[in-house]
Image: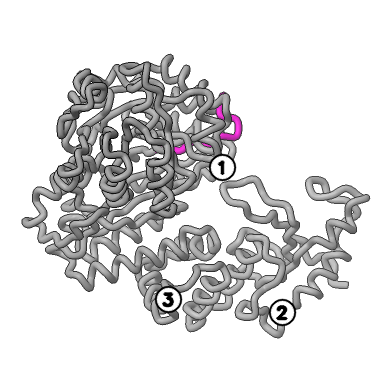
Amino acid sequence: GVNARYSHSCLALFYLRAALARHLPQCPARIVQFTINDPYHEMLLRVAVEKPWAVFLSAAIWNSEIVAHLARDLRFYLPKSRIVIGGPQAGVLQRELSDFGCAVVIGAVEGIGNSLYQDLLSGHLAASYQAARLATTGAAFPFPYRDEDFAGELRHRHVYYESSRGCPHACGYCLSARERGVFHKDLPRVFQELTAILKHQPKELRFVDRTFNALPERALAIWRFLAAQRGNTRIHCEIAPEGFSDEMFAFLATQDPGGWQLEIGIQSTNAATLAAINRRMDIGAALATTKRLAALGSVFIHADLILGLPDETRESYLVGFAALFATGAHYIQMGLLKVLPGTPLAARAEAYGFVYSHRPPYGVLATRWLDGPALAELYWFGECVEKFHNNAFFPSLWRYLRATDEDAAAFFLGLTALFQRRGGFQRAATQEFLAEVLTAFIAPRPDAELLFDLLRYDWLRTGQRRLPEFLALPAEREDMAASHDRAYRLLPPQLPGFYAARERNVFCRRLVCLRLGRESLAFLGWNEQGLLCFPPEKERGLFPWQRVLLLPDADKA
């Protein structure tokens, strides 16, 4: 397997191993995982040196070119070995590799009949093997993991699990649009399999169910089970906003922050676009659900928009971004449409005026509604949002934009233009560089000093101990050293929740203190003037921000 990142794992390989153990128990299989950033020649040699009698490669859009190269070059080192390629891109690679004696498997490995395994033993593989449809094989997909995996190939990696297979939607950009029907494992079996995973306490468990909450009562039952069993494991699910019940909201509101991540595929807020991609969704309700979830404070919300869909203009795309920004979603992913071979959108590419790359990942370059320059502008706009919004460096600034109903699209368009002039997309997106660009961007505004205060506050909440020069306090404001001295005088002998009497001096030495303007403090939720103190301890929340303590100005001595 060739994963996109080291933290990922390839679920398909574990399913394949289970199928091989069932059909060819006399032939042990070993899983080997790489990443797309590993040195290619080392990958090749590590596989070849084992002299395997059969090699199975999983091809997806992020690795299919590497997989194709491996298949060709392995044929040199392993002239008599069977080479089999599966995964979503297997069909695309079939013609490309036809001269190298590679077989491809189309569909889920559980749906492949005995012929593949018989041919593996005989050494006479067909060019391709077509899996049976989901409806006839859903009950057969087994639990793929073994206990030893968690100390081996799954160590320090995300663990992927599917409690259901198939998708209730048929979105035109997705390969799942070719299939119909969803198979759900029964709950006792799900609980048994989750127990087998959670006893190893992986860092993150990611459900690969296409729509986890397609059956809301079932989803809630699984969540309740996970809440009792997960320990420190973080749970990630992809959900549809229209399938959310009040009971689900109530449950998530009781959870400790940081243990749950929900990914919500909004994709577009334009009704014509949603109709073109066959996505049925009440846009207003979807946005309201996203906003309500983000406001809980216990769940990390990742929301998606897709750039380049049919009927999506520059104006409608920016409206969609502004609407999604207003929900307070913690992470807004603005991905470029991938015109995947075999999808309904690919079949209508000419009608939609799609110009797209014919190499993976098949990114769109232009559409009937967005010419090349317009699409490029929005691409960089999305990259700007990725760098400034999605890193949790500036939460108070974004909250201010929402509270004042600022045009978020116009704000980020202007910020994108400045960032490009500064060469930002060619530089490391450090916190200091991003904050410096933001400071320059907001300097001409009439509310600039308030926004500078919010940037100062956010800067210190991330654990920084000094303000950078571009965020220096105004000359008339008490400097941070004087604020620290004042805090030492104002702090009581002991402060429950922060320090005991014998710990006061150590606590004071480690404090960072800042005086903000009255309007800034009021926006941040403090209705009295005073000093903000930042102890080194982190608060318990979705993000590792410093705790904050306000010392009222009761004593000016």
Q: Earlier in the sequence, mark 3 or mark 1?
A: 1
Q: Residue at horizontal 48%, vertical 46%?
A: 6
Where is residue 301? Give x, y as percent: 45, 46
Cα separation, mark 3 vs mark 2, equals: 30 Å
Q: Residue lying at the far top in this picture: please name it.
A: 188
Residue 236 counted in the magenta span: yes
The reply, left or right, for residue 382 in relation to residue 203 is left
Q: Is disc 2 surrounded by few (<14), some (14 to 19) or many (20+) residues within 10 Å?
A: few
The reply, left or right, for residue 554 in relation to residue 223 is right
Magenta-highlighted residues: 229-237
Label 3 sits on a secondary structure element that is helix
Q: Quadrant of residue 465?
A: bottom right
Q: Residue at horizontal 11%, vertical 54%?
A: 349
Residue beneath label 3, please?
A: 419
Q: In the drawing, what numbered circle is on residue 129?
A: none
* 39 over 477 or under it: above or below: above
User: Does the rendering let one see residue 284?
Assistant: no
Q: Report the amino acid beneath label 3.
A: Phe
Q: Earlier in the sequence, mark 2 or mark 1?
A: 1
Residue beneath label 2, please?
A: 477
